[in-house]
Image (tube, rainbow, N blue to C red):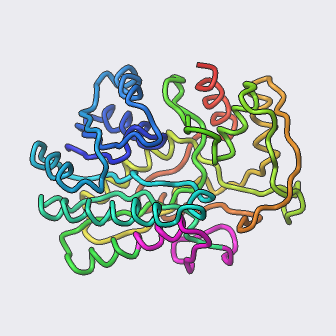
Amino acid sequence: MKILVTGGTGFIGSHTVVELQKTGHEVVIVDNLSNSSETVLDDICTISGTRPIFYKADIRDKEALRSVFSEHKIEAVIHFAGLKAVGESVQIPLEYYHNNITGTLILCDVMREAGCKTMVFSSSATVYGMNNTVPFKEDMPTSATNPYGRTKLMLEQILSDLTVSDPEWSVVLLRYFNPIGAHPSGLIGENPSGIPNNLFPYIARVAVGMLPCLSVFGNDYDTPDGTGVRDYIHVVDLALGHLKALDFAAAHKGVETVNLGTSRGTSVLELVRAFEKESGVKVNYKIAPRRAGDIASCYADTEKAEKLLGWKAKYGIEDMCRDGWRYMNK
């Protein structure tokens, strides 16, 4: 199949492009490079043996998207493109709503014009909100506590409404938990611009001396060691989940919502210790006050992914730390 991957030079997107190309799919990437680099294309080519077709464009640019669809017979879209920092979304909500929602509306409109009605959408476990009990199941009530989460919640509803209005659409909404790690080659991984918003790249940058100290927000939660528990998933496992979702979407009409996680929770300090063990480097950290909006525990029920997609995460926390450290060293 010829697949359009929006945001394909980003962390999760680049790993998914590698796996798509390894399985024989032809990939076209659209990315505005707002939080990634075009040099990732070289690394993707080194790993997979194929350089993906690339367009530097914003998904809000309707004519640019139309040009891509007119030049290529796109059969399905994996949609990663979007702003994704929770804290930043509180500071600049209009940019998040405009980028994430307007961009997706324009993308869907161009897809409809081109007769391409198959999509795998990058959603988030943030849509489970503050009030559900772990493990999180797809049929639980949803809510959001920040603009980023609300964009994901709104887009899930928009895409669901689209499949109701037109039964030719096939959409899989993938709710990610906490992707970390890197490709085992060490060539591609998470390298955010500026100060990292996510825990793992922050740990890695403290370990290599780029940042002085990790702040652990809260050690008085109702968890085994008092620090927040999250479901960390290896980015390669996550990428493979997209291929399974793509296969499912190609064979089934309508909309499905699926968690991608490991069903296991790991605390902040457990992750720090695992990283120290795999890297051999001591990570300097300090305990800081809780952050507003953080919950004690968040991990997935992955039964639906196993039954519906035939997918299950296979990498452990040690693998994630080892591969992430290899990428930082390179």
Q: Image check: 273 left or right of 115?
A: right
Is 330 on the left or on the right of 304, as rendered?
A: right
Q: Is residue 75 left or right of residue 219?
A: left
Residue 158 locus on image (x, y percent): 35, 74
Position of residue 10 relative to residue 305, above or below, is: above
Residue 39 covered by magenta stretch = no
Number of marks in the image? 0
Rendered residue at 41%/23% (across/down): 43
Give the quarter of the image for residue 51: top left
Counting from the top left corner in percent of width and height, residue 295 is at 73, 66
Q: Looking at the image, which is closer to me, 312 or 186?
A: 186
Residue 156 in which image quadrant: bottom left
Magenta segment = 130-156
Question: In terms of depth relative to the viewer, which is nearer, 265 or 159?
Answer: 159
Chief secondary structure of the magenta portion = loop
Which residue is pictured at 58% across the width and 73% down the height? Answer: 144
State the image coordinates of residue 3 (x, y, percent, origin top left): 24, 45
Q: Quarter holding the N terminus? A: top left
State the quadrant of the C terminus. top right
Location of residue 189 in the rendering, given as x and y in whole percent from the top left corner: 53, 33
Please give the name of the residue rendered at 33% of the width and 51% of the height, measured from the top-left corner.
Answer: 78
Q: Is residue 136 magenta?
A: yes
